[in-house]
Protein backbone atom coordinates (compact mmCIF):
# COMPACT_ATOMS: atom_id res chain seq x y z
CA UNK A 1 0.00 0.00 0.00
CA UNK A 2 1.45 3.35 -1.07
CA UNK A 3 1.86 6.14 1.49
CA UNK A 4 -0.42 9.08 0.52
CA UNK A 5 1.53 12.05 -0.82
CA UNK A 6 -0.42 14.49 1.34
CA UNK A 7 0.74 12.64 4.48
CA UNK A 8 4.37 12.78 3.35
CA UNK A 9 4.04 16.51 2.66
CA UNK A 10 2.47 17.17 6.08
CA UNK A 11 5.20 15.26 7.90
CA UNK A 12 7.89 17.07 5.92
CA UNK A 13 6.36 20.48 6.68
CA UNK A 14 6.09 19.66 10.39
CA UNK A 15 9.71 18.57 10.56
CA UNK A 16 10.87 21.66 8.71
CA UNK A 17 8.92 23.98 11.01
CA UNK A 18 10.35 22.22 14.11
CA UNK A 19 13.93 22.03 12.90
CA UNK A 20 14.92 24.37 15.75
CA UNK A 21 14.24 23.01 19.22
CA UNK A 22 15.34 19.40 18.71
CA UNK A 23 18.55 18.23 20.32
CA UNK A 24 21.01 15.66 19.11
CA UNK A 25 20.44 13.11 21.88
CA UNK A 26 23.63 11.21 21.09
CA UNK A 27 25.71 14.39 21.35
CA UNK A 28 23.87 15.35 24.55
CA UNK A 29 24.62 12.01 26.20
CA UNK A 30 28.26 12.23 25.18
CA UNK A 31 28.51 15.75 26.62
CA UNK A 32 27.03 14.57 29.95
CA UNK A 33 29.42 11.61 30.02
CA UNK A 34 32.48 13.68 29.02
CA UNK A 35 31.75 16.32 31.67
CA UNK A 36 31.37 13.62 34.32
CA UNK A 37 34.67 12.00 33.35
CA UNK A 38 36.46 15.36 33.33
CA UNK A 39 35.17 16.19 36.82
CA UNK A 40 35.51 12.83 38.56
CA UNK A 41 37.37 10.12 36.64
CA UNK A 42 41.12 9.77 36.07
CA UNK A 43 42.36 10.77 32.62
CA UNK A 44 45.31 9.48 30.61
CA UNK A 45 46.73 13.00 30.72
CA UNK A 46 45.79 14.86 33.92
CA UNK A 47 47.77 18.03 33.21
CA UNK A 48 46.21 21.45 33.58
CA UNK A 49 46.60 22.00 29.84
CA UNK A 50 44.62 18.86 29.09
CA UNK A 51 41.87 19.89 31.52
CA UNK A 52 41.68 23.29 29.84
CA UNK A 53 41.34 21.61 26.44
CA UNK A 54 38.63 19.32 27.83
CA UNK A 55 36.63 22.25 29.20
CA UNK A 56 37.03 24.20 25.96
CA UNK A 57 35.59 21.25 24.06
CA UNK A 58 32.75 20.92 26.60
CA UNK A 59 31.91 24.61 26.24
CA UNK A 60 31.84 24.35 22.46
CA UNK A 61 29.55 21.31 22.59
CA UNK A 62 27.17 22.95 25.05
CA UNK A 63 27.06 26.01 22.80
CA UNK A 64 26.11 23.84 19.82
CA UNK A 65 23.33 22.16 21.86
CA UNK A 66 21.78 25.34 23.27
CA UNK A 67 21.86 27.32 20.03
CA UNK A 68 19.64 24.62 18.53
CA UNK A 69 16.69 26.12 20.40
CA UNK A 70 17.72 29.75 20.88
CA UNK A 71 18.96 30.37 17.36
CA UNK A 72 20.79 33.35 18.89
CA UNK A 73 24.57 33.35 19.40
CA UNK A 74 24.59 36.06 22.06
CA UNK A 75 21.89 34.44 24.22
CA UNK A 76 23.55 31.05 23.79
CA UNK A 77 26.96 32.38 24.85
CA UNK A 78 25.43 33.97 27.94
CA UNK A 79 23.87 30.62 28.90
CA UNK A 80 27.12 28.72 28.33
CA UNK A 81 29.05 31.26 30.42
CA UNK A 82 26.50 31.12 33.24
CA UNK A 83 26.66 27.34 33.34
CA UNK A 84 30.45 27.13 33.56
CA UNK A 85 30.61 29.97 36.08
CA UNK A 86 28.24 27.94 38.29
CA UNK A 87 30.18 24.70 37.77
CA UNK A 88 32.63 25.14 40.71
CA UNK A 89 29.70 25.40 43.15
CA UNK A 90 28.01 22.37 41.55
CA UNK A 91 31.27 20.45 41.86
CA UNK A 92 31.55 21.30 45.57
CA UNK A 93 27.96 20.14 46.11
CA UNK A 94 28.66 16.86 44.35
CA UNK A 95 31.76 16.26 46.46
CA UNK A 96 29.54 16.66 49.55
CA UNK A 97 27.05 14.22 48.03
CA UNK A 98 29.85 11.68 47.55
CA UNK A 99 31.10 12.23 51.11
CA UNK A 100 27.58 11.55 52.40
CA UNK A 101 27.53 8.21 50.59
CA UNK A 102 31.01 7.35 51.87
CA UNK A 103 30.02 8.22 55.43
CA UNK A 104 26.75 6.31 55.63
CA UNK A 105 27.08 3.38 53.23
CA UNK A 106 29.23 0.61 54.78
CA UNK A 107 29.68 -0.91 51.30
CA UNK A 108 31.47 2.23 50.03
CA UNK A 109 35.22 2.25 50.61
CA UNK A 110 36.49 5.25 48.66
CA UNK A 111 35.32 8.27 46.66
CA UNK A 112 36.77 6.63 43.53
CA UNK A 113 34.45 3.64 44.01
CA UNK A 114 31.48 6.01 44.28
CA UNK A 115 32.45 7.91 41.14
CA UNK A 116 32.93 4.70 39.16
CA UNK A 117 30.17 2.44 40.43
CA UNK A 118 27.30 4.28 42.18
CA UNK A 119 24.27 4.98 39.95
CA UNK A 120 22.71 7.11 42.70
CA UNK A 121 25.66 9.48 42.58
CA UNK A 122 25.56 9.65 38.79
CA UNK A 123 21.84 10.46 38.92
CA UNK A 124 22.56 13.22 41.46
CA UNK A 125 25.28 14.62 39.18
CA UNK A 126 22.87 14.68 36.24
CA UNK A 127 20.22 16.35 38.40
CA UNK A 128 22.58 19.13 39.51
CA UNK A 129 23.75 20.04 36.00
CA UNK A 130 20.24 19.82 34.53
CA UNK A 131 18.84 21.89 37.42
CA UNK A 132 21.35 24.65 36.68
CA UNK A 133 20.24 24.75 33.03
CA UNK A 134 16.60 24.64 34.15
CA UNK A 135 17.18 27.70 36.36
CA UNK A 136 18.74 29.45 33.37
CA UNK A 137 15.49 28.76 31.51
CA UNK A 138 17.22 26.75 28.82
CA UNK A 139 14.38 24.86 27.14
CA UNK A 140 14.23 21.11 26.47
CA UNK A 141 17.93 20.34 27.10
CA UNK A 142 17.53 19.85 30.91
CA UNK A 143 14.75 17.31 30.26
CA UNK A 144 16.82 15.46 27.67
CA UNK A 145 19.73 15.31 30.13
CA UNK A 146 17.57 14.09 33.04
CA UNK A 147 15.95 11.44 30.85
CA UNK A 148 19.43 10.12 30.02
CA UNK A 149 20.04 9.48 33.74
CA UNK A 150 16.57 7.93 34.04
CA UNK A 151 17.28 5.46 31.23
CA UNK A 152 20.76 4.69 32.59
CA UNK A 153 19.97 4.35 36.32
CA UNK A 154 16.21 3.90 36.71
CA UNK A 155 16.16 7.10 38.81
CA UNK A 156 13.80 9.83 37.58
CA UNK A 157 14.55 13.29 39.02
CA UNK A 158 12.88 16.26 37.38
CA UNK A 159 15.39 19.10 36.82
CA UNK A 160 12.95 21.57 38.39
CA UNK A 161 13.11 19.89 41.81
CA UNK A 162 15.11 21.66 44.55
CA UNK A 163 17.57 19.42 46.41
CA UNK A 164 19.88 20.56 49.21
CA UNK A 165 23.39 19.56 50.22
CA UNK A 166 24.74 16.09 51.04
CA UNK A 167 22.03 14.20 49.19
CA UNK A 168 22.29 10.40 49.42
CA UNK A 169 20.54 7.97 47.09
CA UNK A 170 21.15 4.32 47.99
CA UNK A 171 20.51 1.66 45.32
CA UNK A 172 18.06 4.08 43.72
CA UNK A 173 16.21 2.05 41.09
CA UNK A 174 12.61 3.19 40.76
CA UNK A 175 12.98 6.52 42.58
CA UNK A 176 10.72 9.30 41.22
CA UNK A 177 11.14 12.93 42.34
CA UNK A 178 8.63 15.37 40.83
CA UNK A 179 9.13 18.86 39.45
CA UNK A 180 8.07 20.94 42.46
CA UNK A 181 9.60 18.73 45.15
CA UNK A 182 11.73 20.57 47.72
CA UNK A 183 14.34 18.50 49.57
CA UNK A 184 16.51 19.85 52.38
CA UNK A 185 20.05 18.98 53.45
CA UNK A 186 21.37 15.58 54.53
CA UNK A 187 18.40 13.64 53.16
CA UNK A 188 18.73 9.93 52.39
CA UNK A 189 16.41 8.12 49.98
CA UNK A 190 16.28 4.43 49.14
CA UNK A 191 15.02 2.54 46.09
CA UNK A 192 11.43 2.71 44.92
CA UNK A 193 10.55 5.98 46.67
CA UNK A 194 8.00 8.26 44.98
CA UNK A 195 7.77 11.98 45.76
CA UNK A 196 4.81 12.77 43.56
CA UNK A 197 1.63 14.73 42.96
CA UNK A 198 -1.64 13.85 44.65
CA UNK A 199 -3.69 14.95 41.65
CA UNK A 200 -2.47 15.19 38.06
CA UNK A 201 -4.09 17.70 35.72
CA UNK A 202 -2.83 20.28 33.25
CA UNK A 203 -4.48 23.09 35.24
CA UNK A 204 -2.01 22.45 38.08
CA UNK A 205 1.07 22.85 35.87
CA UNK A 206 2.17 26.05 37.64
CA UNK A 207 1.16 25.03 41.15
CA UNK A 208 3.12 23.34 43.95
CA UNK A 209 2.22 19.68 43.39
CA UNK A 210 4.97 17.70 45.07
CA UNK A 211 6.01 17.31 48.73
CA UNK A 212 8.56 19.07 50.92
CA UNK A 213 11.22 16.98 52.66
CA UNK A 214 13.03 18.82 55.45
CA UNK A 215 16.62 18.37 56.65
CA UNK A 216 18.02 15.05 57.93
CA UNK A 217 15.06 12.91 56.81
CA UNK A 218 15.50 9.23 55.86
CA UNK A 219 12.97 7.66 53.46
CA UNK A 220 13.15 3.90 53.13
CA UNK A 221 12.33 1.78 50.09
CA UNK A 222 8.90 1.79 48.51
CA UNK A 223 7.55 4.82 50.40
CA UNK A 224 5.09 7.04 48.51
CA UNK A 225 4.73 10.68 49.57
CA UNK A 226 2.27 12.81 47.61
CA UNK A 227 0.96 16.37 47.46
CA UNK A 228 2.24 19.92 47.31
CA UNK A 229 0.95 20.67 50.82
CA UNK A 230 2.64 17.61 52.35
CA UNK A 231 5.71 18.27 54.48
CA UNK A 232 7.92 15.67 56.14
CA UNK A 233 9.40 17.31 59.24
CA UNK A 234 13.12 17.37 59.90
CA UNK A 235 14.90 14.32 61.34
CA UNK A 236 11.94 12.05 60.63
CA UNK A 237 12.29 8.45 59.49
CA UNK A 238 9.81 7.20 56.91
CA UNK A 239 9.60 3.41 56.82
CA UNK A 240 9.24 1.22 53.76
CA UNK A 241 6.01 0.89 51.77
CA UNK A 242 4.10 3.66 53.58
CA UNK A 243 1.59 5.95 51.80
CA UNK A 244 1.65 9.56 53.01
CA UNK A 245 -0.59 12.44 51.88
CA UNK A 246 -0.46 14.64 55.00
CA UNK A 247 2.13 16.44 57.10
CA UNK A 248 4.48 14.47 59.32
CA UNK A 249 5.81 16.36 62.38
CA UNK A 250 9.54 16.70 62.98
CA UNK A 251 11.33 13.77 64.66
CA UNK A 252 8.61 11.30 63.70
CA UNK A 253 8.89 7.60 62.92
CA UNK A 254 6.33 6.50 60.33
CA UNK A 255 6.06 2.83 59.48
CA UNK A 256 3.73 0.30 57.92
CA UNK A 257 2.86 -2.54 60.29
CA UNK A 258 2.69 -5.79 58.35
CA UNK A 259 1.41 -9.01 59.85
CA UNK A 260 3.34 -12.17 59.12
CA UNK A 261 2.17 -15.61 60.25
CA UNK A 262 4.42 -18.64 59.99
CA UNK A 263 2.88 -22.10 60.31
CA UNK A 264 4.35 -25.56 60.04
CA UNK A 265 2.94 -26.90 56.77
CA UNK A 266 2.82 -30.47 58.07
CA UNK A 267 -0.43 -29.55 59.80
CA UNK A 268 -2.75 -27.87 57.28
CA UNK A 269 -5.95 -26.07 58.28
CA UNK A 270 -9.15 -28.10 57.99
CA UNK A 271 -10.37 -25.97 55.09
CA UNK A 272 -7.35 -27.02 53.01
CA UNK A 273 -7.84 -30.74 53.64
CA UNK A 274 -10.02 -32.01 50.83
CA UNK A 275 -10.02 -34.54 48.00
CA UNK A 276 -11.08 -34.03 44.39
Image (cartoon, rainbow, N blue to C red):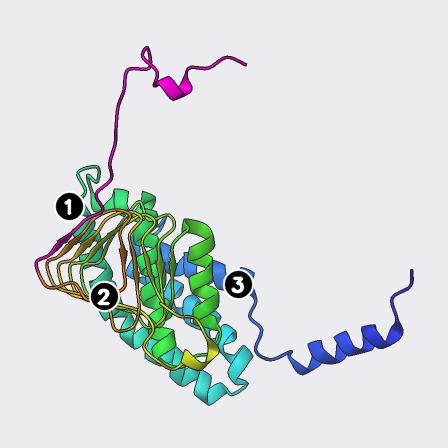
Which of the labelled discs sits on residue 260, or is there none? none
Horizontal relation, residue 252 to residue 273: left or right: left
Residue 259 percent coordinates (x, y) = 24, 36
Q: Residues within 10 Å of mark 3 (few under 14, many from 20)?
A: some
* Secondary structure character of the magenta stretch overall: loop
Contact between marks 2 and 1 (CB within 8 A): the answer is: no
- Please provide the residue range marked out in magenta: 251-276
Q: Earlier in the sequence, mark 3 or mark 1?
A: 3
Mark 3 = which residue?
27
In terms of secondary structure, where does tag 2 sit?
loop
Residue under the image location 38 percent in, 54 percent down: 155
Q: Single out the residue that lies furthest toward the left.
A: 251
Q: Report the quarter where the N terminus lies.
A: bottom right
The answer to whether any part of residue 98 appears in the image is yes
Q: Single out the residue that lies furthest toward the right.
A: 1
In space, the residues marked 2 and 3 are separated at their CA atoms by: 43 Å
Q: Residue 158 magenta-drawn?
A: no
Q: Residue 253 magenta-drawn?
A: yes
Contact between marks 2 and 3 (CB within 8 A): the answer is: no
The answer to whether any part of residue 41 appears in the image is no
Rendered image quadrant of residue 59: bottom left
Which of the labelled discs sits on residue 246, or is there none? 2
Q: Residues within 10 Å of mark 2 (few under 14, many from 20)?
A: some
Q: Nearer the viewer, mark 2 or mark 3?
A: 2
33, above or below 265, in the image: below
Q: Nearer the viewer, mark 2 or mark 1?
A: 2
Mark 1 = which residue?
104
Residue under the image location 21 percent in, 56 percent down: 97
Tell how many labels: 3
Amino acid sequence: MAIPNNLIERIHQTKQSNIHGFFDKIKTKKWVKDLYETLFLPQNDNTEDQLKRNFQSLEETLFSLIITVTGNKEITQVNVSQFFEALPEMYDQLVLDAKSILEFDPAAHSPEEIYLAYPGFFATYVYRISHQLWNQEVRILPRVISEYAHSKTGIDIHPGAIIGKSFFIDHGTGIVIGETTVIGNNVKIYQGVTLGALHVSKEKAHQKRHPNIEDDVIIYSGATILGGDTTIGRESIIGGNVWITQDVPANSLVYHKSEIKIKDNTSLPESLTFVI
